[in-house]
Amino acid sequence: MKAILFGASGMVGQGVLRELLLDPAVTEVLAIVRRPLEPVPWPEIDVHKLVELERKDMTDFTPLAERLTGYDACFFCLGTSSAGMKEAAYRRVTYDVTLAAATVLARQNPQMTFLYVSGTGTDSTERGRSMWARVKGETENALLRLPFKAAYMLRPGFIQPRHGIRSRTRWLRLTYAALTPIIPIARLFGAGKIITDTASLGRAMIHIARHGAAKRVLENADLVAIAKTLPAR
């Protein structure tokens, strides 16, 4: 499988990148980045199949159309927190960038499977009171209309970082550090359906890219269930 990855420097993207590099059936990972990635924190992993492609303008991928041809799957993990953002600015980052990439990829790779990391609480009606949930819902709906072989919207909940992966957002790093000790207890009381981790999410996404899923919109519980069927690494 040849894969394209957006958001490789983010927490979710790092988790997906690690699992892609570990998977022997993945022959190439093309990471679309605004700036060069930092060295991966996994010295045991062969990174030779990782290719970086820098793109400053993430609103237009037409000039890269030929370079983005011949791929089997796209893992779109690029995103930002809506905290402190006006709706127009958040929509540019969330909707416009995603659709700019996806539209070109669908045209160049009609047999591609596209996986979009959204989030728990996304509003598919596009009419709710929560700004971020409306924009995410609009983005999901637009992606589902594109002519990919298959497209899946993934809505993880709380994601525990593993294998040295850290969020780039300071308040999220502090939140994860504070909550990590109580996660095992929370799981005992049934919170497992809303908790996943970067490794499990990455493995679940690769499985979906390869084998599909019963639903096009998968909530955290669906992702957890898929991950439980897969061997850990």
Image (cartoon, rainbow, N blue to C red):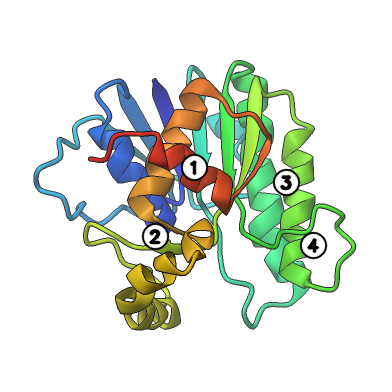
For the N terminus, the image quarter is top left
Is residue 116 rendered to the left or right of residue 72? right
Q: Amino acid at mark 3?
A: Glu
Quick one: label 3 or label 4, which is nearer the N terminus?
A: 4
Structural crowding at the residue carrying mark 1, measured as other residues with C-alpha within 10 Å and reported as few (<14), some (14–19) or many (≥20): some
The x, y position of residue 46, in whole percent, is: 15, 35
Quick one: label 3 or label 1, which is nearer the N terminus?
A: 3
Q: Amino acid at mark 4?
A: Arg
Q: Which residue is mark 4?
A: 134
Is residue 4 rendered to the left or right of residue 41? right
Q: Judging from the image, what secondary structure is the residue with disc 3 in?
A: helix
Q: Which residue is mark 1?
A: 225
Residue shown at 41%/51% (left/top)? Answer: 13
Structural crowding at the residue carrying mark 3, measured as other residues with C-alpha within 10 Å and reported as few (<14), some (14–19) or many (≥20): many
Is residue 10 rendered to the left or right of residue 84? left
Tag count in the figure?
Answer: 4
| Separation of marks 3 and 2 at Cα, in angstroms | 21 Å
Quick one: label 1 or label 2, which is nearer the N terminus?
A: 2
For the C terminus, the image quarter is top left
Q: Amino acid at mark 2?
A: Met
Q: Which residue is mark 2?
A: 11
Q: Which mark is residue 82?
A: none
Residue 26 lies in quadrant = top left
Marks 1, 2: nearer the viewer: 1
Quick one: label 2 or label 4, which is nearer the N terminus?
A: 2
| Separation of marks 3 and 1 at Cα, in angstroms | 22 Å
Residue 113 in view, yes or no: yes
Q: Which residue is mark 3?
A: 140
| Separation of marks 3 and 4 at Cα, in angstroms | 10 Å
